[in-house]
């Protein structure tokens, strides 16, 4: 009899624990429908729209679901916000693992998204899109990252909304040539590729994963979203002597390499190929000289 009572007690205790866990999971889901920011499970979140109907359910751990209709522009995102004092090199290597059930109806982007300051830059690494593949502006070539090809673009936004109010700023884009809705994004590799083409990054304000809709409707369920940051500071893209900064000493190091006096190796040699054509030559020297004269 005592054994049976013990079994019943254990059974009810298990049920109690399961119900408690279920209740905690239910409480963890928070739904917002209008502009809001906050933090949950160590991730910053934001819903921003100018008008229309939106809903964003925060499921914890960087994951969320969202839907939108009759909007002009709306962004749903989770990620990491910073205090505008560190470059991406100082933060360390950045990557994102994600998976999303993405169902846009019209113009929409599924991408890495964020801002820098000094200079003020809005950036996108677009993994998938709706009816229109962005952005069709100034081409900066192509790169291969994570086994895929991305087209690079730069655009100028004049007197448009930004994290610093209405302003004129640059947009940087990496747009995947084929859509995908899950995988790993080596974010820092895109940053370095942009900088190697003269698209300067500033101090980091944000790295996030975003679902954006523009004059469209749709829904998405981000079931996995983790941001990995660390691994030590990266060497700046134009740093050719490994001292952590870009200045006339790097130009001297490149000149010495081209004259055969010294030899650049490793990361220094990779960084010396500024135009990424597979060789280090006078064209790279001219590009570095131009950058030093006008680093912005």
Image: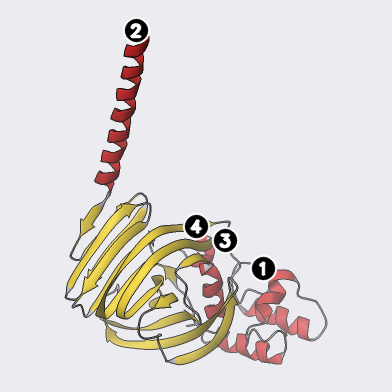
Between disc 1 and disc 3, whose residue precedes? 3
In front of the other: label 1 or label 3? 3
Q: In whole angstroms, how far apart are the C-alphas of marks 2 and 1?
A: 73 Å
Label 1 close to label 4 by CB (< 8 Å): no
- Dot 2: few (<14), some (14–19), or many (≥20) neighbours within 10 Å? few
Residue 75 occupies quadrant: bottom left
Label 1 close to label 3 by CB (< 8 Å): no
In front of the other: label 4 or label 2? 2
Q: In whole angstroms, how far apart are the C-alphas of marks 4 and 2?
A: 52 Å
Q: Which mark is residue 228?
A: 4
In front of the other: label 1 or label 4? 4
SS class, disc 2: helix
Q: Which mark is residue 242?
A: 1
Q: Which mark is residue 233?
A: 3
- Dot 1: few (<14), some (14–19), or many (≥20) neighbours within 10 Å? some
The residue tagged 2 is: 2
């Amino acid at each position: 009899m005592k054994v049976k009572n013990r079994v019943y007690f254990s059974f009810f205790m298990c049920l109690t624990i399961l119900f408690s866990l279920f209740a905690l999971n239910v409480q963890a889901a928070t739904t917002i429908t209008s502009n809001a920011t906050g933090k949950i499970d160590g991730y910053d979140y934001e819903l921003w729209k100018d008008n229309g109907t939106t809903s964003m359910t925060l499921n914890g751990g960087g994951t969320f679901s969202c839907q939108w209709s009759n909007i002009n522009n709306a962004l749903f995102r989770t990620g990491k916000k910073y205090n505008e004092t560190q470059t991406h090199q100082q933060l360390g290597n950045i990557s994102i693992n994600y998976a999303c059930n993405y169902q846009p109806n019209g113009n929409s982007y599924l991408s890495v998204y964020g801002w820098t300051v000094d200079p003020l830059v809005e950036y996108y690494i677009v993994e998938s899109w709706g009816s229109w593949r962005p952005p069709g502006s100034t081409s900066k070539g192509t790169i291969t990252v994570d086994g895929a090809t991305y087209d690079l673009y730069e655009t100028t936004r004049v007197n448009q909304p930004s994290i610093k109010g209405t302003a004129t700023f640059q947009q940087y884009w990496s747009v995947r040539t084929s859509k995908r809705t899950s995988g790993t994004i080596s974010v820092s590799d895109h940053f370095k590729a942009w900088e190697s083409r003269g698209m300067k990054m500033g101090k980091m304000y944000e790295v996030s994963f975003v679902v954006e809709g523009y004059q469209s409707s749709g829904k998405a369920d981000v079931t996995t979203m983790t941001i990995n940051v660390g691994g030590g500071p990266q060497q700046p893209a134009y740093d050719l002597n490994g001292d952590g900064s870009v200045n006339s000493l790097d130009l001297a190091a490149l000149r010495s390499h081209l004259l055969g006096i010294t030899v650049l190796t490793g990361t220094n040699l990779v960084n010396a190929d500024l135009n990424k054509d597979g060789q280090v030559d006078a064209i790279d020297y001219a590009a570095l000289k131009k950058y030093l004269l006008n680093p912005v």
